[in-house]
Image (cartoon, helix red, strand yellow):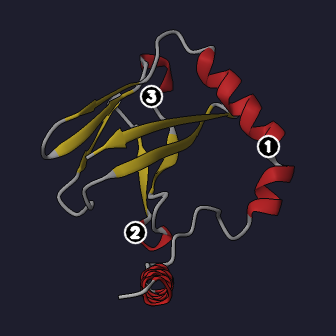
């Protein structure tokens, strides 16, 4: 085999490799990392900063405990009567996002079963209000 054949084989192998790589990349699932209304969310970012500041001023921190079958969120006593939502945000696939409403009437704990959640990284985005004040907390968890 002469030098020209080796160059042609190397070039052919490179072309096959590049075509395989392009095919593999095109067949990947759509990964949505940005929410569809991110412009509106960016404008309201100061409100999020205020909510985070209100959360940091609480008498005790919010405790999130993860077990094999559930997630238990414990709120301070001063937040009894709060109403809000917990968004389970999946960064790798927006179609898996789940929003759970909650009301802390007499208790200060919220237990959420995790059997329906896919394994992997989730971001808990909690938003709630109590006595005219708005609060927010984000926490990453891995199931």
Give the residue at x 25% y 47%.
143
* Residue 86, position as x, y percentages in the image: 46, 49
Label 3, residues with CA under 10 Å away: few <14, some 14-19, many ≥20: some
Label 2, residues with CA under 10 Å away: few <14, some 14-19, many ≥20: few
Q: Earlier in the sequence, mark 1 or mark 3?
A: 1
Give the residue at x 45% y 28%.
80
Q: CA distance from mark 1 to mark 3?
A: 26 Å
Q: Residue furthest left?
A: 68
Q: Nearer the viewer, residue 100 or 107?
A: 100
Q: State the SS at label 2.
A: helix
Asked if 92 appears above or below 134 in the picture, the reply is: below
Question: Which residue lies under the disc numbered 3?
Answer: 80
* Residue 14, position as x, y percentages in the image: 48, 80
Give the residue at x 31% y 43%.
142
Q: State the SS at label 1.
A: helix
Asked if disc 1 and disc 3 are in contact, CB closer than 8 Å, the reply is no
* Residue 110, position as x, y percentages in the image: 31, 39
Q: CA distance from mark 1 to mark 2?
A: 24 Å
Label 1, residues with CA under 10 Å away: few <14, some 14-19, many ≥20: few
In the rendered image, the quadrant that contains the N terminus is bottom left
Q: Nearer the viewer, residue 15 or 105?
A: 15
Q: Earlier in the sequence, mark 1 or mark 2?
A: 1
Looking at the image, is mark 1 or mark 3 nearer the viewer? 1
Question: Which residue lies under the disc numbered 1?
Answer: 45
Question: Which residue lies under the disc numbered 2?
Answer: 96
Q: Is residue 39 left or right of residue 86?
A: right
Q: CA distance from mark 2 to mark 3?
A: 30 Å
């Amino acid at each position: 085999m002469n030098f020209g054949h080796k160059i042609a084989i190397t070039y052919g192998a490179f072309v096959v490799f590049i075509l395989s790589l392009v095919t593999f990349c095109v067949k990947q699932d759509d990964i949505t990392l940005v929410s569809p209304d991110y412009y509106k969310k960016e404008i309201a970012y100061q409100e999020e900063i205020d909510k985070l500041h209100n959360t940091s001023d609480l008498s005790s921190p919010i405790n999130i405990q993860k077990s094999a079958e559930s997630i238990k969120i414990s709120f301070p006593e001063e937040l009894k009567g709060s109403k809000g939502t917990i968004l389970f945000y999946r960064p790798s696939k927006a179609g898996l996002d789940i929003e759970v409403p909650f009301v802390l009437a007499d208790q200060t704990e919220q237990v959420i079963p995790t059997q329906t959640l896919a394994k992997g990284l989730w971001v808990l985005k909690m938003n709630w209000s109590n006595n005219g004040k708005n609060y927010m907390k984000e926490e990453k968890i891995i199931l």
